[in-house]
Amino acid sequence: MKYQIGDEILVLHSNEEGKVVDFINDKMVMIEVRGVKFPAYMDQIDFPYFKRFTQKKIVEDQKPLKQFIDQIPQEKPKPTGTKEETGVWLTLIPKFGLDDFNDEIVSSFKVHLVNNMATAYGFQYKQYLSSSLNFELESTIQPFHDFYLHDLAFEAINDTPNFSVDFSLLQKVKYKAAHYETTLKLKPKQVFNAIEKLKENNEPTLSYLLFDTYPDEAIVETFDISKLSAAGFKVYDAKKIKENLPAPRTVIDLHIEKLTNSYLHLSNTEIMGIQLSEFDKWFDLAVAHKLPSFIVIHGVGEGVLRDELHSILKTKREVKHFINQYDARFGYGATEIFFK
């Protein structure tokens, strides 16, 4: 869910600021403005940060108050100017302008991949807004180089942007992993606070570390299975492995009361762990049995489980796409996953 209890909000029709105090359903929340509580549809409110940064019209022909890196064209990859290995980073360079009152406002971000490592990588980059793919790119980045990816509109921060990058080595190295996937999810409140600190410290970018050490290949131990067979264990032919797998399900329900009878004493973290473990089991079986799709019932609530599942699905190579839309059977409380 876009909002959480306690979030500051702006009432669009009255331009008043308040906060979220409760959830009514998946479309309405209870808000409090100047001590008065009343219900509001989610499309009638927004985060106040966007207004604070963009409420004044940008004057394009005025000279910017500060000089930032993005004022110099850098559409092509270029050296980062350092030889110190500090990792691979995703950076957002805010584009500032001036309003009619000479106040700085942010209009957009230039998104860069920065490779401060002595290794060249191939990468598959995908950027999502909410659960929808907004931009994707496949390319390579050289050692100690900066790669411009795309522009991101400032208002898109309200859609909780998610960045997914699948790295690979251009030159194979023994005992190093063939691929390394990493994701970054930005929350609106965190980004807006980071921009304020950036302006106070006169810094040019928002930087997020993706990794500082490329992972080693997973070690697979081998052993003589004939000894197991001789000891009386049942050994299956790998070619017939599907015959020995549990039957898959086309629909799974992750409500905790469906998974265990002893849940009242569990913390939210423990409940989430059980739910995600159950999801992993049935997801793997769906893939192994090559199902075309299957449905995960996660409920509505505050949307924490749904958002976590969606973040996981964005990193799964087997997933073609997924949809969380109204269904007569489950309302908005289920996500349908389609496999490649």
Image (spheres, rainbow, N blue to C red):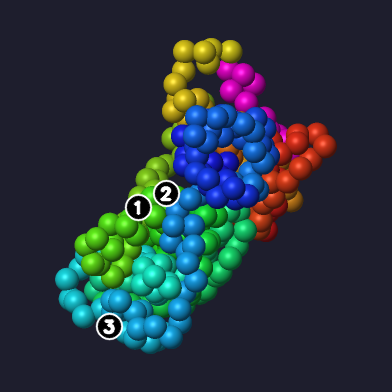
Q: Are marks 1 and 2 in contact (CB under 8 Å)?
A: yes
Q: Amino acid at mark 1?
A: Asn
Q: Which circle, 3 or 2, is nearer the viewer?
A: 2
Query: Residue 154 location in percent, x, y?
Result: 48, 65
> Mark 2 sits on what residue?
189
Q: Is residue 74 magenta?
A: no
Q: Which residue is mark 1?
A: 193
Q: Nearer the viewer, residue 202 or 132?
A: 202
- Taking the magenta stretch, the answer to whether it contains residue 251 is yes
Question: The residue under label 3 is which amino acid type?
Answer: Pro
On-image quarter of the N terminus = top right
Residue located at (36% from left, 68% from top): 103
Left or right of residue 10, residue 340 in this image: right
Would you name the residue on which mark 3 appears?
A: 79
Q: Is residue 327 above or below residue 232?
A: below
The local secondary structure at tag 3 comes to strand
Q: Depth check: give the residue in front, 31 or 314.
A: 31
Q: Position of residue 254 (x, y in %)?
A: 62, 30
